[in-house]
Image (spheres, grey):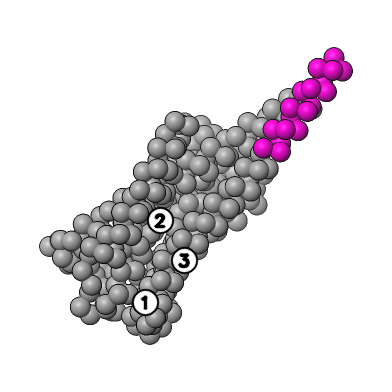
Amino acid sequence: LTQSEKYTAAAYLVVFLGVLVYAVIIGAKLQRLQREVEQLVEIVKEQRVGG
Amino acid sequence: LTTHLKLPVLAAVCTGLFGLAISLAFFYAPADADQGLSQRIFYFHVPLALTAYACFGWGAWKALRYLRTRDERADLESYVAIHQGVIFGALTLLTGSIWARISWGVWWSWGEDELVLFLVLFLFYCAYFMLRFSVDPGPARANMTAVYALFGVVLIPVSFLAIRLSKQFIHPVVFKLEGPQMAGSQFFTFCVCLVAMLTLFATLYAIELAGKRLDRSLRELKELLT
């Protein structure tokens, strides 16, 4: 690869990686929200059993 | 933008547009006689910068809406838009730095007004988060951050026009009053890349906003149940 090709590939890779990292962070947050929803479902079930 | 039905459509359109944009940038647009292959960084670098401006502008518009209506949703929308703007801004600086290295032989040039003013704009909006997270949530925080976001938008035209007012011309001026200084096929490729980048912003904005709203609703529900 020439220097020009390397730098051009690096620039496009930076954008791709930026979006990928963002997607991973959003994915992690969604997993956390999913866990919280499950916890809430458990709370509601316990309240129904208790009530 | 933020309805659930539109999100999959946006994501699909965004993916398609990016495929088209990359294909056009590498296989349709002619190679630059002076810079060769590295000029193709332009097709992502400039749309990234313009999208960052659009994000900050959208964030300021939502901040203005918050100040007029005191609607909490507008505050959240302003925050998400500015968050997106900082991401696109960081990518602009990174791609610009790589392009500068291959074109000018340096990673950064402090003598270039365009570069320095974009960095100032970027750091200004980075400080937005320091302000937002140093104040407890509530109307006071929303008011302060809205005013801050509105002040920042003043820097956008300054940053955009800096290149035209600058005495130094290392950074190329492509868009002039006479029209774009490039071939028709290059301009078409640039336009597709810009639309793809703006669609990416719209998609990420919708995803992040949906996540934040879901998070807020869950917190409220948790408080009600416990």
Q: Is residue B178 above or below residue A38?
A: below
Does residue A49 show up magenta in the picture?
yes
Mark 2 — on which chain does it sit? B
Query: Which chain contains the residue that carries disc 3?
Result: A
Residue at the spot of label 2? B52
Which label sits in the foreground, 1 or 2?
A: 1
Q: What residue type is labelled 1?
A: Glu
> Does residue B19 lie above or below B203 as drawn?
below
Range drawn in magenta: A34-51
Q: Which label belongs to residue A5?
A: 1
Check disc 3 and report the residue beneath it: A14
The residue lying toward the viewer, choosing from B53 and B214, is B214
Residue at (74% x, 27% y) in the render: A41
Q: Distance between the residues labelled 1 and 3?
A: 14 Å
* Residue mark closest to the camera, 3 vs 2: 3
Q: Is the magenta stretch mostly helix, strand or loop?
A: helix
Q: Distance between the residues labelled 1 and 2?
A: 26 Å
Within the image, what quadrant is residue A4 found in? bottom left
Q: In this view, does B34 lie to the left or right of B202?
A: left
Q: Position of residue B151 (x, y in %)?
A: 44, 52
Label 1 SS: helix
